[in-house]
Image (cartoon, rainbow, N blue to C red):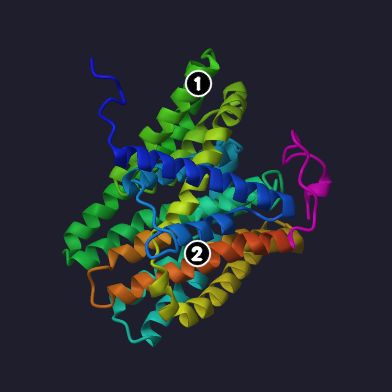
Amino acid sequence: MTPLFAAASSDTALELIELGAVAIGLSLLARGAHRVGLPAIPLYLLAGLLVGHGGVVSLDVSETFIARAADIGVLLLLLTLGLEYTAEELKSGLRAGAASGGLDALLNFVPGFACGLLLGWRTTASVLLGGATWVTSSGVVSKIIGDFGWIANRETPAVLNLLVIEDLAMAVYLPIVGAVVAGRGAGQTVVTVLVALGAVAAILVLALQYGSHVSRILSGASDESLLLAVFGLTLLVGGVAEKVHVSAAIGAFLVGLALSGPVQHRAGALISPLRDLFAATFFVFFSFQLEPSTLGDVALPAVALAAVGILTKFAAARFALGRSQVGPRGQRRAGAALSARGEFSIVIASLGASTADGADLSSLAAAFVLVTAVASPLLAKLLDRSPAVPAGQGRNGTGSLIR
């Protein structure tokens, strides 16, 4: 039998060295951010720009490997959020959040759509830019909530409700715009949308109705077995969801939601180190793909659109949390977290890469996402004027959580 590394080439050795150097670099960035009391996300994003395409230092690491690790990072971020909530909380939140989700869509789609038209783009590219300015980055929001200890705050359930509603809306939006870009007929588009909606309904029913059975099966597993089972189930459900044009993030969130009791708490503790590792990879890879040279040409419209987009997210958060009787401080924190756009926005913009305005759309969307993804955690830090919730204190604790 050939030894595992017997055929390792010098290229493989160089990639391992570069990956190790990147990991150590991220460790130093995280340590520095912690010492000065800032979130590490902006530093991760800027690091990705420096070592990515057209950056100061060019790395030859395998993009396929980094991309898969980044995908896993998003899934694990959403899994751990799902582990903090129950099925009943999700049901009540979705029922109460429909109006808030509708206003969120209106307030945040219109600026992008209008910006595209003002720039002289065709309607298709403008619709795609509207989608990119609408949907919040689940990965960035979940990282902010975890880093600042907001999981027990009164505003967090409403924030998660908006994220879930947006991701569910993407199950309709993405097939429609994808069909429009591809020039498909109305019949094909309707079939695609119905398949996506059916998949969403099936995943929701399975998670909410049969999650307790999964928890019972896993309750007697060792830590090693439980970790592997939860990790594998997250990837499996996320992959199936993606296959039927539903957000993989929704699948991962519902896996966490389906687990309950002691299994829920054990899984959260076991998965946290993996989450932190892969989440850091996600943020670096996100900006790793951007071309710094193309961002300068669209800097002005991107900053202006980001400013409007942040204000509209604050307005949507104020409306949503006002209905939940959360005070102004909680509303501001929610607005800061929701301001970040990310993975979905890039996916939406990439759908129009082959259109007449595709190059401009990709550059503007990338610059817009970078600005909001950096601004969101910084705003969250600025607006966070209350101490983190003590470990072990849940959202049903004292009234002091109502801010």
Left or right, residue 168 beside residue 387: left
Expressed as whole percent of the image width and height from the top left, the position of residue 275 reads: 53, 38
Q: Residue at x 17, y 60 (%)?
A: 187
**Magenta residues (range):** 383-403
The answer to whether the residue labelled 1 contacts the one labelled 2, judged by CB atoms less than 8 Å apart, is: no
Left or right, residue 324 beside residue 345: right
The dot on residue 102 is 2
Label 2's element?
Answer: helix
Left or right, residue 383 beside residue 42: right
Residue 149 located within the stretch drawn in magenta: no
Q: Amino acid at mark 1?
A: Leu
The dot on residue 226 is 1
**Residue closer to the observer: 372 or 99:** 372
Q: Which quadrant is home to the N terminus? A: top left
Q: Residue at x 51, y 50 (%)?
A: 139
**Residue closer to the observer: 339 or 369:** 369
From this viewpoint, which residue is outermost toward the front? 10
Q: Which quadrant is home to the C terminus? A: bottom right
Expressed as whole percent of the image width and height from the top left, the position of residue 51 reads: 44, 57
